[in-house]
Image: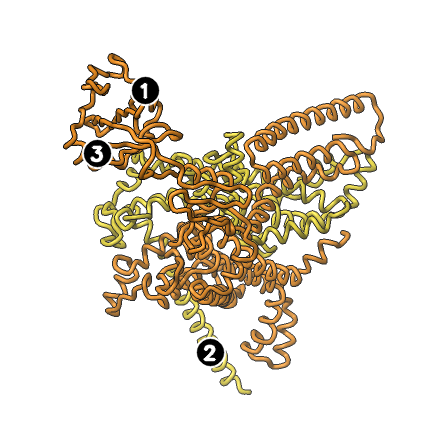
Amino acid sequence: MENKNGSIGTVAKKSISSLSSFITTFIIIAVDVLLGYITYQLASMGYIPLTVVFIIIILLISAAFLIPKLSHLRWIVVGLSAWLLFSIFPILFTIYNAFTNYGDGHLISQTQAIEQITNQTYLPETGKAYEWVAYRSDDNDYLLWVKDNEGNTFIARPVESEGETRIFDVVPGENGIGEIDDEGAPVTIEGYTRLNRILAATDQNLTNIKFGDPEKTIQVRSPSEAAELLPLYEYNPDDNTFTNQQTGKIYYNQEGTWTARDGTQLIPGYNAVIGFDNFVEFATSPGLRGPLVTIVTWNFIFAAMSLLLTFSLGLLISVIYGDPHFKGKKLLRSFLIIPYTIPSLITILIWRGMLNPDLGIVNRLLESVLGISPDWFNVPTLARIAILTVNTWLGYPYWMLVTSGALQSIPSDIYEAAEVDGATGFQRFWRITLPLLLVSVGPLMIASFIFNFNNFNLIYIFINGGPPIPTATTTAGYTDIIISYVYNLAFASGRGVQYGYASAISVVLFMLIAVMSLIQFRFTNMWEEVGENV
Amino acid sequence: MSDQTKAKKTKTITQQRRLGLILRLILAAVLVIFSIFPVIWIVSASIDPVNNLATQKLIPDNAGFENFRELINNPIFPFFTWLWNSIKISTITTVLTLSLTTMAAFAFSRFRFKGRQELLKTILLVQSFPNLLAIVALFSISKQIGDVFAALGLNTHAGLILVYLGGAMGMNIWLMKGYMDTIPRDIDESAHVDGANDWQVFSKLILPLLRPILVVIGILSFIGTYGEFIIARTLLTKRELQTVMVGLQIYTSGQYTQNWGVFSAGALIAALPIMIIYLVLQDQIVGGLTAGAVKG
């Protein structure tokens, strides 16, 4: 670090300072070289967006350490780099995805898709034909001997065979080839049985196997003929269309999918920008909107009820046991915060076991005492009650701790004045305690609402959003909240993986959360404090 | 008012008090049972050799440590490797989070530079975006980095820690900066006059005063990282690299009702370090909670 003030000018100090600035420079160069190497590699692999992020990071680090005017950035730059890479970039990436068709069938780039489609072949009904003889091993490996009409012969392995030459000449003594018959076909090949006409005709695999190299593929067409396969689609780069060589049908590019006039599509499509389609689908498709209305409604109810229940129970406890005369307060508190001290994943899993409808302890108790056995996992309302119960258990200790702290900070002379005026205990609570409390813990209530609004862990681990909504076309359940719905949409949907659509909902959700956060910041005066000079 | 009625009134008040106390104690008992029953239940399950949810009793027959032995000896589910992975990842993440956020908060609290407010506001707002929603992006970034630099890619603890650090800025910086703002700037100024540079002011003067808030943020960061499972599960797919939270979920997937005892034993061991931290340091944590931290 440089000594900016430089007020003490002893030689020793100066040399230390120049040594340390030398070391600093050296470290910066080393870091830049390492990052530069990674960036170069990323660029050469074609990861362009990530390359750009890395270049920004390198520029930031270099600027912070080499430009004296920006030296304050040194304190932030490492955290900032991690933040850019793993917070900002993923958000931008998600927003970009929201405008694409990224997902099953559209995972690859246009170039890759063209290559894959061009590689598709078909077996022409006429065309260059071969005579053939097939050989089969005990492990159902096949070899195909062929002779074209000019008399050239060779032997081909299946296209799938790895690490071996797929096409080789017929040379007795090599590759296990024994004697050769009049036609030029080997009578024996070591490890294989030559299939006679009857065996070949009854072999069920033979006509499905493609032999030879990917560029020169041969398939058995009839008992007497084998033929070379031809590319099925021809790509026309001028208007970005494919033409089917067999039927002549033309496939036009439509937002990343080549589609014919009659609506048939080529697979795969590619990852393309499709504008606002995901958002439009989100707003208009009845199959999607159906569960979404249920899910959004429940999301708000769930967050509000969770807040209400945990806050009320927590407040009740701190009011009842708050007075200093109550002995054992500390001991009681230690017991009551236990739910809060266990990692939530563990407690949710425990509750899932305890509430298991058939085997869990809760239902075994209810069964023996009341003779009922509610199905917590399969009846929508019961599942929702179960989730709220578990969440109350998880969350009330937090509010007990927060409200007991806040209650103590309410000055006692207010109560004395109220007592003089003849207010009852209930009035004092309702008119004085609660309003004052709400002012001081209001921001935390909004934070808690937002937390529960996105409480993925509880919903996902407890019953993964179930029970399922039967009318939904996607994986959606009665206890799903938006975030768990999006997660399933992206990873486990019945309609396949749909990153683009899931990203669009994420963007909408993000805007909802951002609005709620801004309200919270207003309450806490965070915005004002940010700008305050201390 | 005669002495007699006065005495009578005092008596009723005492009776009321006593009744109130009894009611409170009953309610307290109910609440305590509600709070600790699940814990007692898994303690009981963990020492119940039956290892089955359906037949578990509160007081097991032939109680023993079979389930714990299973945890130690099962090579397919390397429980203690997972536990060690979790402790290692959480500790390193916490230490790095504290270093990064303390230094950043120092800059935001002490320096006045262009774009300071905007940057701080952006960091706060971005924090509210759940990174779970960007999990596809996080996965592909990790994969791409791993393609050119395997030590920071998928299936490495370093890569996971890096992703966690990306989310470390935010509320932590806010809490830390707020605390630092309460330390008068006169202290730094007089030190500057005496020839101290920024680094010396930070490390010799400010840092020692930050102990209370460092403890709070450190604990909450450790607990948050320790309990995280979705990102860990996505980025670490090799079984021996996984964390204990992901591992516990594996025990309960599929035929979990048949594996209940072993799961309980594991859950107990995994929860214990965090419970101890909470119970010992509860006063500090309460301070942090009221300052605005929400458990993740």
A37 vs A406, nearest the viewer: A37
Position of the N terminus of chain B by quadrant = bottom right
Answer few, some or many: residues within 10 Å of disc 1's Cα (few below 14, many 20 plus, some between 14 and 19). Answer: some
Q: Are marks 3 and 2 on the same chain?
A: no
3 or 1: tag closer to the N-terminus: 1
Question: Label 1, label 2: how many angstroms apart (C-alpha)?
Answer: 111 Å
In this rendering, position of residue B49 left or right of residue B113: left
- Residue A198 locus on image (x, y percent): 14, 32
Q: Colour of chain B?
A: yellow
Q: Which residue is mark 3?
A: A223
Q: Which residue is mark 2?
A: B11
Q: Are marks 1 and 2 on the same chain?
A: no
The residue at the point 61 percent across, 71 percent down is A435
Tag 2: amino acid: Lys
Measured along the vertical axis of the image, is residue A386 above or below residue B53? below
Q: Which mark is residue A168?
A: 1
Observer-side mark, 3 or 2, equals 3
Kindly state the secondary structure of the residue where label 2 is placed.
Answer: helix
Chain of the residue that carries numbered disc 1 in the rendered image = A
Measured along the vertical axis of the image, is residue A198 above or below residue A387? above
Q: Are marks 3 and 1 on the same chain?
A: yes
Tag 1: amino acid: Phe
Chain of the residue that carries numbered disc 3 in the rendered image = A
